[in-house]
Amino acid sequence: MSRITIVGGGVIGLSCASALLRAGHRVTVLEASPIRDAASWGNAGHIATEQVAPLASPASLRSAWGRRFAVGGALDLPLHAIGTWLPFALRFVAAARPHRFRAGSSALRALLAEALPAWQRTPWAGQYLRTAGHFVLWEDAGKAAAGAAAWRTADIGTARIDDVDAGEIARLQALTSAPIAGALHFTGTGQIADLDQLAAAMERDIVAQGGAIVRETGTMTFAHGEAQVPGHEADLVLVAAGVRSKQLVEAAGHRAPILAERGYHIRAAADRWPQDLPPIVFEDRSMIVTRYADSVQAASFVELASPDAPPDPRKWRRLERHVAELGLPMGAPFTRWMGARPTLPDYLPAIGRSRRAANLLYAFGHQHLGLTLAPITAELVAALAKDTHTPIDLAPFDLERFGGKGGIA
């Protein structure tokens, strides 16, 4: 079997490492951060099988103006970062054309259909995977009627929508002083019980199987048509480094127009939040609240900027205001976090084997769906490493869709 070096130790990289070790390979994971500050470990914990429609869509273009941060929405395109996000935005508009949106939806549908089953096949599913779905709530009656109608006619893949009964409404209403004008219960979706505990369990699993986790960033060079990671001899190299993947694969001649789509969260002690309550989306506020083992978290925002730019404290303050206005049972002191989702302009991940470097594999750009798609991505990468047929067509996720040196994007 092969010696494989994985650059990136987020949920995608660790999932791939576990699957590759189980397939008999020798695996080393390179991850510089020991504090789990990547987007993998700060998200909403939601297994989002319902998110079949890529955000690069005609509907997103129509609604973008009304979703701006300046008017209370979650979307922020900071003027100071226009040089970063404008090229991405132009590609996004092209990817949102109806025929490309339909193709993207078809591609995501195939991945998402296997997302929850793949999670259930992982060794940590029994302890950390919950499958009670999630709730979507509205405070405004008009928005509730329109939103519920839109969800009921949307393509949500293997997820299903149930009406919320009086008992569930009463339980949800007990959490908030705001009126609940409408609510839906999604089933066939899931949640991770605690991201910190999951990360630790995944790392223990890798080490127990004989893999290694090395605290370094990892760089790549290319010679004689193959990728090399200095200091680590390998037959195969897998790039799973989130937003840092761009510079790694572009050194091989690929083009990877990835952007940091930054999200924010606040966390508080969970002593007053029901332990068994699934995640709740407060749709009017574009905010999702998740109970973890010992904390409750409110998360939101789509901020297009450099991953290294300073965070915007206004986002945290708005989350804190939402929590106060809703009267939710979570209070100060809050811990604050900001992380960069790795997003490609068509909102499809990059999963495949390079046609420019014979031993290079890649798995990055999962946008909001990194946690959701990590296990199925790992199974696909294991098939690629063995050079066998993959159960899902990977052509839509090929990096060559963006061209490269001598290519046309």
Image (cartoon, rainbow, N blue to C red):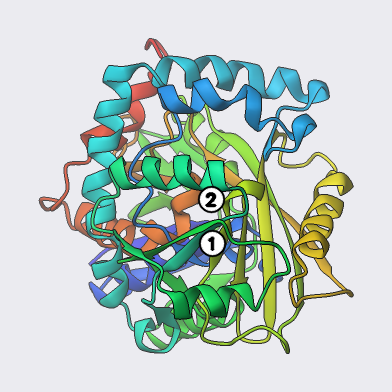
Callout 1: 10 Å neighbours few (<14), some, many (20+)? Answer: many
- The answer to whether residue 211 of the structure is visible from this angle is yes
Earlier-in-chain disc, 2 versus 1 = 1
Residue 389 placement, left or right of 179: left
Q: Which residue is mark 2?
A: 241
Nearest to the observer: residue 249 or residue 323: 323
- The answer to whether residue 365 of the structure is visible from this angle is no
Looking at this rendering, what residue extends furthest in the left direction? 389
Residue 244 is situated, as x and y percent measured from the top left of the image, at 59, 43
- Whether 294 is drawn above or below 68: the answer is below
Q: Which residue is mark 1?
A: 10
- Dot 1 falls on a residue whose secondary structure is loop
Look at the image and tell me in which quarter the C terminus lies: top left
- Whether 89 is drawn above or below 384: the answer is above
Nearest to the observer: residue 104 or residue 374: 104
- Dot 2 falls on a residue whose secondary structure is loop
Residue at 51%, 80% in the rendered image = 193
Residue 31 placement, left or right of 106: right
Residue 407 is situated, as x and y percent measured from the top left of the image, at 37, 12
Residue at 40%, 60% in the rendered image = 372
